[in-house]
Image: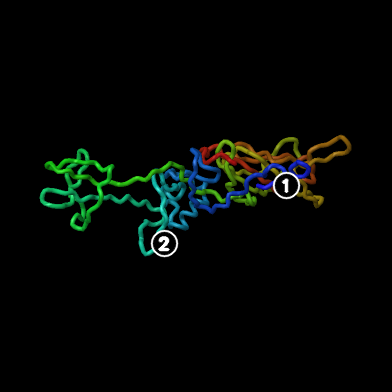
Amino acid sequence: MSVAYFKGKALTGPMGPQGPDGNPLGTIISYLGNEPPNGYLVCDGKEYQIADYSQLAAFFEKEFGSKSHFGGDGTSTFAVPDFRNLFLRGFHGESEEKLSGEIGAKQEGTEHYNFVPTNDGWRAPRRFSVNESESPVPNADKMIGGLVSASATAMSNTGTKVYDSYTSRPVNAAVQYCIKAIESTAAFDVYSTEETRIGTWVDRRPLYRRVCTATSPSSVKDEKQYVMSLGYDVALVSISGTIASSAGASVQLPSLGGIGTSCQIYAGLPDVRADGKIYMDVHHTNYTSQPITFTIEYTKPTDQATGGLPE
C-alpha cells in the first residue's frame, strides 16, 4: 500500500478492517488452521442441524437433489462432505477425457500392476497382500508392461520376484478443506421477522437475529407484563426497538419523559427471558396497547459451539 507524506508525516491513517468474504455459498477453501474461519465448516462428514445452516442445506438440495446427499436424515439434520485425506480434482465437464468423477463424488485411486520377467517370458504377476491368499490380476490379458515403483512391495513366488499393485503419492502438505456455510452479511444487514443466522458469537455458538412485532401491554403498571413468546430458549445478546404513541409519534425504546431534572420511563425496552418469553413495562397511557417493533440478537443454549471464531 502506497502512503503519501507531507513534511515527513503520513497523510493516511492505519489500514481499515478487511472487507467481507465474497465467496459464494458452497465454496471450498484450503485453510491452514485447526478451526474453520467464520462462516465456514470443516469438510469432515460431520452432521449439523438444518436449522443452524439452512442456507447450505438448501444449496445441497438444489445441486444434488437432497439436503441429505452427504448424510443426515434430510429433515432435521444434514452432513457436509468428507474430504479428509483426499486431493480435490477439477471436474471433467465437457472435456473429451472423462477423467474425474461427478462433482462432490469420491473417486477411488487407480491401482497399477507390473509385468515381471520369468523363466518362460513376461507375464502379469498374481496379486499378493499380507495374510491374504493369492488372487489373479483383473484384466491381466489387456495390460501392458510398466515400471516397477520403488515403493512397491517385492514378494516371492517360486523363486521369482513378483510385485504387488501400488499407488503413488506426490509430495504434499496437509490443510483443512472448509466449505462456505453462511452467506456473507458483512456487506449488508439482514432483517426479517423470521429467525436469521447472522454469524457466530464469541462462544462459537450460532448468532441469530429476529425482528419482532407485537402490542404493548393494555394497562399502566409498575411491573413488567407479558408481551409475546419466541417459542424457544435464548441467551440475549442485544435488543433495540420503537413504540408508537397515541399522540401520533413513534419513539425509540426505552421512551423517556419528564420535566427539568425529573425524568421517568414512559415505556421500557422489552425484557427477553431465558425461556424466550418477552415482557415490558408501560408507565404512561399514551403507550398502552400500541404497536411495538424490536430487533433482538441472541444465541441458543441448546446449540453446540461450531464454526470458527468471529473475525
x then y, percent, for residue 52: 52, 45
For the residue pair 210 and 11, the one nearer the viewer reads as 11
For the residue pair 122 and 8, the one nearer the viewer reads as 8
Looking at the image, which residue is at 70% across and 46% down?
3
Are there few (<14), some (14-19), or many (20+) residues within 10 Å of tag 1? few
Looking at the image, which residue is at 36% across and 62% down?
97
Tell me which numbered mark, 2 or 1, is placed earlier along the sequence. 1
Number of numbered discs? 2
Quadrant where the C terminus sits is: top right
Q: Quick check: marks 2 and 1 in contact, CB under 8 Å? A: no
Residue 96 lies in quadrant:
bottom left
| Residue bearing mark 1 | 4
**Label 2 vs label 1: CA separation?**
49 Å
For the residue pair 43 and 110, the one nearer the viewer reads as 110
x then y, percent, for residue 169: 35, 45
Snapshot colouring: rainbow
- Seen in the image, is 259 located left or right of residue 126? right
Q: Is residue 275 above or below residue 112?
A: above
Amino acid bearing label 1: Ala
Q: Residue furthest right?
A: 260
x then y, percent, for residue 179: 49, 48
Q: Secondary structure at mark 1?
A: loop
Are there few (<14), some (14-19), or many (20+) residues within 10 Å of tag 2? few
| Residue bearing mark 2 | 93
Q: Secondary structure at mark 2?
A: loop
Q: Residue furthest front?
A: 7
Amino acid bearing label 2: Gly
- Seen in the image, is 9 located left or right of residue 301? right
